[in-house]
Amino acid sequence: MSPIRVLIVDDSAVIRRQLSEVLGADPEMAVAGTAGTGLLALQRIRELKPDLVTLDVEMPGMDGIATLVEIRKIYPRLPVIMFSTLTGVGAAATVEALARGATDYATKPSQTGGLERSCDLVRQELVPKIKALCSVRGPLQVNAPVVAVPAHPRMPTRIDLVAIAASTGGPNALGELMPQFPQDFPVPVVIVQHMPEMFTRLLAGQLDALTPLRVQEGRDGEKLEKGQVWIAPGNHHIAVRARGNERVLGLNQDAPENSCRPAADVLFRSAAEAFGKNVLAVVLTGMGADGTRGAGAIREAGGAVIVQDEASAVVWGMPGSVVAANLADRVCPLDGIVPEVLRRVSFRRVLASAVRG
């Protein structure tokens, strides 16, 4: 396969040169070109037809978000990775960019650690994302219609908790899913989205504005109530645990799992322990295999697992790993996830009515 052609967009000549050197040294990639402004970036995309764009968030004139909006009008499927500083301003702009269609983001390394350290951080964070997003390249403008495919249907059980895992492409996916939940959703929802501190708080606020449910960052010891949505804070694992007859959230900073903190495996394992068979896990788009071992624990406890399908996922790493391990009860396109959740959760009411009858 030909090298992945990347267009680098950043107002800093130092960053453009640094990224060019790191990406150009990788045999699987080639720098298609660079641009120092948003307007020039739009011109270069037309001329060079890159496979992926890295886009600086904070640029003078047409900033990264405005540039992204213009890119999405013409190239809805072109992968765009936002490149931002790990600051409050950078985090807020990045979360907004993800809501407006950015594919993923990477944080700019601080130059205080030296050039080689900065290059190492780019290799560790940005390069794997570029390769994952461009692992299957094809027409960018076509979204083929897909239908839900049953994987391992089993007798449904009462659902008392919905646990969701997401990574690359997750903020966009969650932004589409959360408005579909009804105000009277009868169980709590706990989400692990791979993001650093600050980003998760901003994401929670963004999602809270989209749904009739209350969306918040998780807090240690908080009681789980119906209709609440909790997002794991960046740099913290989130778990659920029994406290007498209640179920509460627990936060910790134990070692990362699958190179992630928060990790979906931590949440899923704890959900299986605290709720047994009454858990529904949802695995959305994302790199890697986080969530697979936890999905195994949920299935072993008698719970159910549904995953996003390959056609609608930005990266089918996490959901694909669950499918490969034969742990998925159902595989759905993104627009079929919430209807499937509601169908399974509604069975809770059917059971309750049967018991009362």
Image (tube, helix red, strand yellow):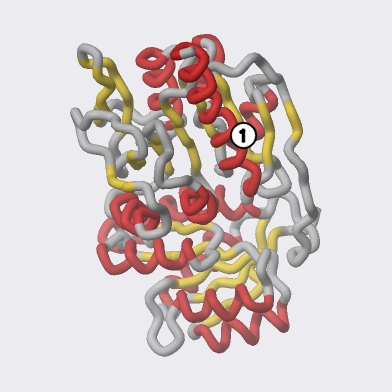
In the picture, measured across the screen, residue 131 lies left or right of residue 303, that is right
Q: Picture quarter containing residue 48? A: bottom right
Residue 344, percent from left and from top: 57, 28
Residue 257, percent from left and from top: 41, 28
Q: Picture quarter containing residue 96? A: bottom left
Residue 303 in view in this figure: yes
Residue 123 in view in this figure: no
Residue 249, percent from left and from top: 26, 28
In the picture, measured across the screen, residue 330 lies left or right of residue 268, that is right
Name the amino acid type tagged 1: Val
Q: Picture quarter containing residue 73? A: bottom right
Above or below, 279 against 131 in this view is above
Closer to the camera in the image, 191 or 179:
179
The residue depicted at 54 percent of the width and 77 percent of the height is 69
Above or below, 278 against 308 in this view is above
Closer to the camera in the image, 309 or 292:
309
Which residue is outermost to the front? 357
Above or below, 173 against 14 in this view is above
Q: Which residue is mark 1?
A: 307
For the image, the number of numbered tags is 1
